[in-house]
């Protein structure tokens, strides 16, 4: 500032004047001894000093100082404080930028200039650049102000990976370097400029990004070591990175990393757990051999099991070093030995491996959290005698002597008293084979039709948010739980749950190790099984074949759109015809952001709570801080069922209603919570700072479009 090198800490201000006490006009920063005390009255009030400065922006003042017992007169230029305050704000990639203000520079003892990160958001958080950072370079170009930063940013295509240099206020003498992935898809890029006449901020939309350069295929070289079975499966192990731009589907975090296994290298299909890829909406990357990283898209999320499939473009890799893992059709038995091969938590090229022994197969129970989120149900897992090698990994596989995968070591998001934690279990490979085969067919058809991921299929013929089903595969949409035969039969005939001893013997005969019967614990509104089954039904047989395990039920209904279940209900045995549900990918593929609310269709985990408003509605997944939604206390875990007395059935109907609401309109909003309780709120729309838009999946591309709300009412 103008006082740098002129004033020093400890100077005592004696007098301030709008003219030179001696009549001369030395240059700014020059000093001399005062010639007269009478012409410069003492300055003993901040108010007097502020009045003097406010009267002379762009001019000069003379300060009489005492430093070390010696009086001096200094001439300083007065700058306009309004000109030193940011008058422009850039929003891009979910981040907020403006020039570093004079006030912040003074507080942090930093020189003015540079670009201040007001909110790190999605793009900068992924690069580990925090809020309050001051960016000095982007893509090796100096960014002394917001205009320079904007110019460089607009020249970069979506997905460009560029260096960014920045400093932090608490250690601004040290410059830091990060690698930034430019984001131009998930968020609308906007710039706000202050109109000095009206004191209003005007918004302008950023132009679209330039097209990206054509990708260059990269070569992968895996580091292999260990016995033959380890060497055989190592070229199939990859690291999966997944970043989520919006807090939807009850996700607990926004940044995930885990291990994946390539199951079809010809089409680029990778198997991963749903703790790593919990939702459909997100940016996925696959890392090979800790050296090569390529983008991927979400291909399939299993609605009930802890598996997901992502797909990359094999054309981005040259050579044939990446291989498909072969999944064994033979299940693991208790006491069987196998080799564990996994990727370490540290970013190392060599995998870790160790001999393991199957200890047991058991039911995986995941508790219900207060926020509805995906949890695996009807899941049987394999537990091993584990060692340090398994605990220090992000996942892996269990292989036999020939290198065939017998089980997948996957992470589960578990909950205890609303505390989330990660738990690894073995996922059997055998039940995955039909799903993988169907997904490989879909991926191959997509590759032949459209080429690499990101084709032009718009999903015409099905509603937004409804992914296509896997052809010919079905599941029983009911959450089951095992009940021991001793409890089901009771001590005497007719006691317990009323199961006869004859049925108990038939169930034992079909699975010697499992002395249990399956009971319906939870049904999902809107599914075929809802209304045909009841909570508490004991499932005895499917199409006349006794079943008492999750895999047995799943296999019995897998190819059947309709089955006959033999159930025990209210102590009586009966046959019930039940329609099964088509197996389709889970996950939300259409969201709407309005007045800071993140809205979506009610996802499966919400419906698992057992209630859905009869007339439909749109579900509030999250709200953005500082928005009208937060101000007027419209909170998540509620459905919007009415706007100004008009019913809301779905997202399309909601968008049609809000498109008629002008800026500043008062809106009556009726909400229904997860328990069916109704409440009413009012909200004042803000289309200037909180413009509405929608993000939806078209084929394999995510598309953002504005809602085009009307301006302020006249």
Image: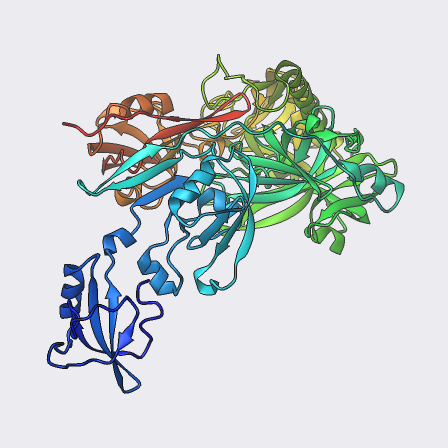
Q: Quadrant of the C terminus?
A: top left
Residue at position x 39%, y 65% from top? Answer: 109
Asked if residue 575 shows in the view, the reply is: no
Say which quarter of the image contains residue 577.
top right
Query: Where is 714 relative to 53, above or below?
Result: above
Q: Position of residue 519 (x, y in %)?
A: 58, 33
Q: Position of residue 74 (x, y in %)?
A: 25, 72
Q: Is residue 458 left or right of residue 667?
A: right
Closest to the observer: 505 or 253? 253
Closest to the observer: 514 or 260? 260
Query: Where is 290 relative to 657, above or below?
Result: below
Q: Residue furthest front?
A: 24
Q: Residue furthest bottom?
A: 69
Residue at position x 30%, y 21% from top? Answer: 656
Residue at position x 46%, y 59% from top? Answer: 168
Residue at position x 14%, y 76% from top? Answer: 40
Say which quarter of the image contains residue 169.
bottom left
Asked if residue 473 shows in the view, the reply is: yes
Q: Is residue 567 left or right of residue 17?
A: right
Q: Position of residue 159 (x, y in %)?
A: 55, 35
Closest to the observer: 623 or 452? 452
Q: Is residue 49 left or right of residue 658?
A: left
Q: Position of residue 549 (x, y in %)?
A: 67, 32
Q: Coloring scheme of the render? A: rainbow
């Amino acid at each position: 500032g103008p006082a740098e090198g002129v004033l020093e800490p400890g100077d005592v201000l004696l007098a301030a004047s709008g003219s030179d006490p001696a009549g001369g006009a030395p240059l700014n920063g020059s000093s001399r001894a005062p010639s007269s005390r009478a012409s410069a009255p003492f300055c003993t009030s901040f108010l007097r000093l502020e009045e003097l400065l406010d009267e002379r922006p762009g001019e000069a003042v003379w300060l009489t100082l005492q430093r070390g017992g010696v009086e001096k007169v200094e001439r300083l230029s007065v700058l306009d404080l309004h000109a030193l305050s940011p008058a422009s704000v850039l929003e891009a990639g979910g981040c907020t930028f403006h020039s570093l203000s004079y006030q912040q520079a003074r507080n942090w003892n930093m020189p003015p200039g540079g670009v201040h990160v007001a909110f790190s958001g999605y793009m900068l958080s992924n690069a580990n650049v925090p809020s309050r950072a001051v960016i000095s370079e982007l893509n090796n170009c100096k960014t002394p102000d917001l205009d320079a930063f904007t110019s460089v940013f607009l020249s970069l295509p979506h997905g460009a990976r560029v260096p960014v240099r920045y400093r932090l206020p608490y250690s601004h003498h040290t410059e830091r370097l990060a690698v930034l992935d430019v984001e131009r898809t998930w968020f609308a890029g906007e710039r706000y400029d202050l109109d000095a006449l009206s004191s209003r901020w005007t918004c302008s939309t950023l132009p679209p990004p330039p097209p990206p350069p054509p990708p260059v295929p990269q070569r992968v070289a895996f580091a292999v070591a260990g016995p033959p079975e380890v060497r055989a499966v190592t070229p199939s192990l990859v690291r999966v990175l997944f970043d989520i731009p919006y807090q939807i589907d009850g996700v607990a975090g926004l940044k995930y990393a885990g291990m994946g296994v390539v199951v079809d290298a010809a089409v680029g299909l990778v198997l991963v757990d749903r703790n790593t890829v919990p939702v459909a909406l997100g940016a996925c990357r696959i890392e090979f051999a800790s050296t090569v990283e390529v983008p991927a898209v979400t291909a399939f999320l299993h609605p009930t099991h802890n598996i997901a499939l992502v797909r990359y473009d094999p054309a981005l890799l040259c050579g044939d070093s990446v291989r498909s893992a072969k999944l064994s059709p033979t299940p693991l038995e208790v006491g069987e030995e196998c080799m564990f091969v996994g990727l370490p938590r540290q970013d190392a090229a060599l995998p870790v491996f160790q001999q393991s022994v199957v200890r047991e197969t058991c039911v995986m129970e995941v508790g219900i959290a207060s926020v509805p989120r995906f949890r695996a149900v009807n899941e049987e897992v394999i537990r091993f005698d584990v060692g340090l090698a398994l605990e220090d990994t992000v996942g892996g596989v269990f292989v036999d002597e020939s290198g065939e995968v017998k089980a997948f070591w996957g992470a589960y998001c578990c909950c205890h008293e609303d505390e989330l934690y990660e738990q690894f279990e073995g996922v059997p490979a055998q039940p995955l084979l039909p799903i993988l085969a169907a997904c490989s067919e879909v991926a191959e058809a997509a590759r032949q039709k459209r080429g690499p991921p990101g084709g032009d299929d718009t999903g015409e013929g099905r509603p937004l948010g409804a992914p296509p089903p896997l052809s010919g595969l079905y599941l029983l949409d009911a959450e089951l739980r095992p009940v021991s035969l001793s409890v089901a039969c009771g001590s005497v005939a007719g006691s317990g749950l009323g199961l006869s001893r004859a049925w108990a013997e038939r169930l034992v005969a079909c699975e010697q190790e499992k002395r249990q019967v399956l009971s319906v614990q939870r049904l999902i509104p809107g599914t075929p099984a809802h209304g045909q089954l009841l909570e508490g039904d004991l499932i005895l047989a499917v199409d006349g074949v006794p079943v008492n395990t999750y895999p047995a039920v799943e296999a019995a209904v897998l190819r059947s759109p309709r089955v006959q279940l033999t159930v025990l209900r209210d102590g009586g045995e009966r046959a019930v015809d039940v329609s099964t549900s088509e197996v389709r990918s889970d996950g939300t593929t259409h969201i709407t952001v309005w007045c800071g609310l993140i809205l979506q269709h009610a996802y499966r985990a919400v419906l698992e709570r057992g209630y859905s408003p009869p007339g439909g509605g749109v579900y509030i997944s999250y709200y953005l801080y500082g928005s009208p939604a937060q101000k007027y206390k419209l909170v998540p875990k509620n459905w919007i069922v009415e706007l100004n007395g008009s019913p809301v059935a779905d997202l399309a109907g909601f968008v049609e209603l809000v498109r008629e609401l002008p800026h500043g309109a008062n809106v009556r909003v009726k909400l229904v919570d997860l328990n069916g309780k109704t409440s009413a709120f009012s909200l004042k729309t803000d289309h200037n700072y909180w413009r509405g838009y929608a993000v939806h999946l078209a084929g394999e591309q995510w598309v953002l479009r504005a809602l085009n709300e009307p301006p302020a009412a006249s």
